[in-house]
Image (cartoon, rainbow, N blue to C red):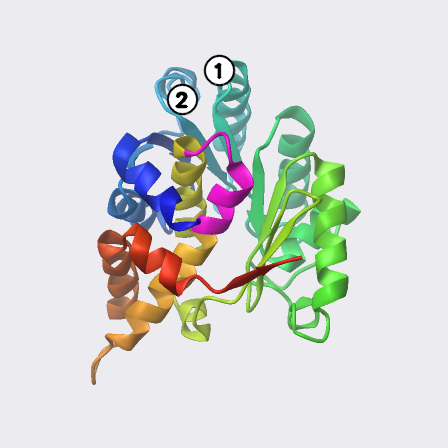
């Protein structure tokens, strides 16, 4: 079932507008190309409304905020909403500063979001309206484990219902829910956390999956999460002596480039709660 969603991207080649952070912008563009989409990066306020109008999806990532990009995010988001385009918010580091937290909450309030994709600490911050984290990674105390899985599923479902969108919470165990159905996904490798931007890449790729599968957004979002985790597994299996995290980053992108519906269908490891 989930394998069809990567084929949708390859068949439709959706154009994805990314207002993302400058730490990972190149990798985001490359993984969108690898999965079959077409990326465009624009964060100039005078440019974003026209750019997003020609795209099928908008990926908003608050990883490196400034006053100009906040204005661009709101303008592009409102234009995408007018056109019925898929809109994803990646609230990077929400809870680490007032600017990040307040910006994410403002975007949630003023835009119709299809997906919020973040780690569990970021999502908890958005659910509470405030929070503290030690950076852009999830706090250890918040980590979803087998022992805390049921309560985490209940929490993420409640958040998705309240936010009125799909919540995709990624970590050691990934949870993707529309508030009713939750995909519990166990693909991935812990070493993916040693690469800057695997979450940012996932947000860009997920936006392409959403744009190519607008009638089944929950499944499209879950398929993207499975694909990224599976790429981490495949990429790690191809590491050689002397390889490090820079090589691993490229192997993940290469694994997405070569992934087809059969590979994703066979390798996706998930259950539905």
* Residue with the mark numbered 2: 52
Q: Dominant secondary structure of the magenta stretch? A: helix
Number of the label disc, if any, that sits on residue 83 = 1
Position of residue 77 relative to residue 228, above or below, is above
Rendering coords of residue 71 (x, y %): 53, 25
Residue occupying image coordinates x 55% and y 58%: 170
Rendering coords of residue 88 (x, y %): 52, 37
Residue occupying image coordinates x 63% and y 49%: 94
Rendering coords of residue 131 (x, y %): 74, 54
| Mark 2 or mark 1, whichever is nearer to me | 1
Judge left or right: residue 57 versus residue 242: right
**Could one spot residue 91 in this view of the protein?**
no
**Could one spot residue 191 in this view of the protein?**
yes
Image label count: 2
Q: Is residue 220 magenta?
A: yes
Outermost residue on the bottom side: it is 241
- The answer to which of 264 and 143 lies nearer the viewer is 264
Residue occupying image coordinates x 73% and y 46%: 159
Mark pair 2, 1: CA separation: 9 Å
**First to last magenta residue range:** 213-223
Give the quadrant of residue 29. top left
Position of residue 243 relative to residue 250, above or below, is below
Secondary element at tag 1? helix
Q: Quadrant of the C terminus?
A: bottom right
């Amino acid at each position: 079932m989930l394998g069809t969603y990567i084929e949708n991207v390859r068949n439709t080649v959706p154009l994805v507008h990314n207002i993302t952070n400058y730490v990972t912008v190149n990798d985001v563009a490359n993984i969108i190309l690898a999965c079959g989409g077409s990326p465009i990066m624009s964060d100039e306020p005078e440019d974003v409304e026209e750019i997003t109008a020609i795209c099928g999806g908008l990926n908003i990532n608050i990883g490196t905020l400034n006053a100009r990009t906040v204005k661009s995010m709101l303008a592009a988001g409102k234009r995408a909403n007018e056109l019925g385009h898929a809109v994803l918010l990646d609230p990077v580091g929400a809870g680490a500063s007032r600017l990040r937290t307040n910006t994410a909450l403002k975007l949630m309030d003023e835009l119709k979001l299809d997906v919020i994709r973040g780690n569990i600490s970021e999502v908890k911050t958005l659910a509470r309206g405030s929070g503290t984290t030690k950076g852009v990674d999830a706090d250890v105390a918040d980590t979803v484990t087998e022992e805390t899985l049921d309560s985490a599923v209940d929490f993420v479902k409640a958040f998705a219902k309240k936010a009125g969108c799909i919540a995709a919470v990624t970590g050691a165990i990934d949870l993707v829910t529309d508030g009713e159905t939750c995909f519990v996904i166990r693909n991935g490798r812990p070493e993916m956390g040693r690469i800057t931007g695997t979450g940012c890449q996932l947000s860009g790729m997920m936006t392409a999956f959403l744009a190519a599968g607008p009638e089944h957004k929950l499944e499209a979002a879950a398929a993207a999460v499975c694909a990224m985790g599976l790429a981490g597994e495949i990429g790690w299996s191809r590491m050689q002596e002397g390889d490090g995290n820079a090589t691993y980053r490229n192997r993940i992108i290469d694994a997405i480039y070569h992934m087809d519906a059969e590979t994703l269908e066979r390798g996706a490891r998930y259950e539905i709660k």
